Image: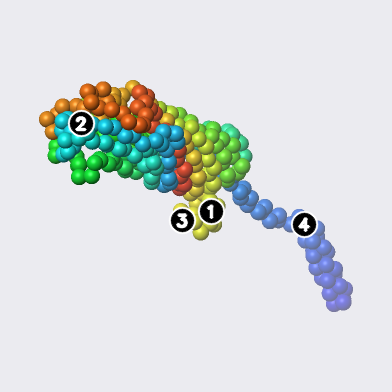
Amino acid sequence: MKKILLASTVLAGLTAAASAADLPRRAAPPPVFTPVPVFTWTGFYAGFNAGYGFGTSDNNRGTLVAVPGSYGLTTAAGPNLIAFQGERSADGFVGGGQIGYNWQLTPGSGVVIGIEADAQYVDFGRDRNRFAIAPVGAVQAPGALIFNPNGLTGLDYFGTVRGRLGYAFDRTLVYATGGFAYGSGGGRDFGLPNASRDEFQTGYAVGGGIEYALPTDSFLNFFRASAVTLKVEGLYVNLDQGNRNNGLFGVNAAGLPVGLSSPGVQLVSGVTNNRRDTEFAVVRAGVNYKFGSY
């Protein structure tokens, strides 16, 4: 009897185990899928830049003017020769900042449209009014002003507001740019206060460049986000000077102007253009911070 009960118990246990094995198992939760973000150039940005600017005008000839000593520009009785150098000083350091916005039509690779504004300090025209007086011993008379009649390029600052159109190859953006330009400074190079080129000038700027967004793990990406970009850019800037009284080049201590049309004054050599634009090219490198990681 005991053997029969034991066999029945074993058989019941095996039947229960087999039934449990046939029960459906509880499925494990699927792994969480985290998509890899696709970089986009869309967003606001701001940064700074530095580079070098150089004049593109072909007027590099010096100017030599013979002036009688009676006009009071020099200390010698004259006639005196006043020699001005050419346009060799239209170059120097350029640096400033920029802000802008980009809109990328398709993430990853695609067309990028943007707008950018910048303001730049320039160190142009340091020697724009440098001259030499002959004969030896003649110097500029006290209180007199002498300025280059050919108006060499000189600026204190300039800025632009430009559109940008380019194509992004993921994190690399190649673009062309163009738009409005402005500038001021340069000093009085005609003598009379009302005939100086120290006023606001406007014109245009065109150029292009290439920009690269640093990966998150780059040691140069100090924000540890896809937010830092590096760029190299070239610009041609033309600021319209319009018509100026470039024949005026001196004011004596009494405030009387002396021009190329004054009696006894002779333009020995040089050029006296009635219209000169401030033309220069800029090559610069910059860094931007793009607001928003992606």
Residue marked by disc 2:
68
Tag 3 secondary structure: loop
Front of the two marks 1 and 4: 1
Looking at the picture, does residue 192 appear above or below residue 20?
above
- Give the position of the N terminus as an image quadrant: bottom right
Q: Position of residue 188 (x, y in %)?
A: 25, 33
Name which of mark 1 and mark 3 comes first in the sequence: 1
Residue marked by disc 4:
23
Residue 222 bears which disc, if any? 3
Front of the two marks 1 and 2: 2
Along the horizontal axis of the image, is 91 left or right of 149?
Answer: right
Front of the two marks 3 and 2: 2
Q: Residue at x 62, y 39 (%)?
A: 109
Along the horizontal axis of the image, is 173 left or right of 149?
Answer: right
Q: Nearer the viewer, residue 256 or 31?
A: 256
Q: Is residue 135 visible?
A: yes
Q: Position of residue 229 (x, y in %)?
A: 50, 47
Tag 1 secondary structure: loop
Amino acid type, residue under disc 3 in the picture:
Phe
Q: Residue at x 45, y 38 (%)?
A: 281
Residue marked by disc 1:
216
Q: Position of residue 230 (x, y in %)?
A: 50, 48
Q: Nearer the viewer, residue 251 or 189?
A: 251
Q: Is residue 196 visible?
A: no
Q: CA distance from mark 1 to mark 4?
A: 49 Å
Crowding at mark 3 (Cα within 10 Å: few <14, some 14-19, many 20+):
few
Name which of mark 3 and mark 2 comes first in the sequence: 2
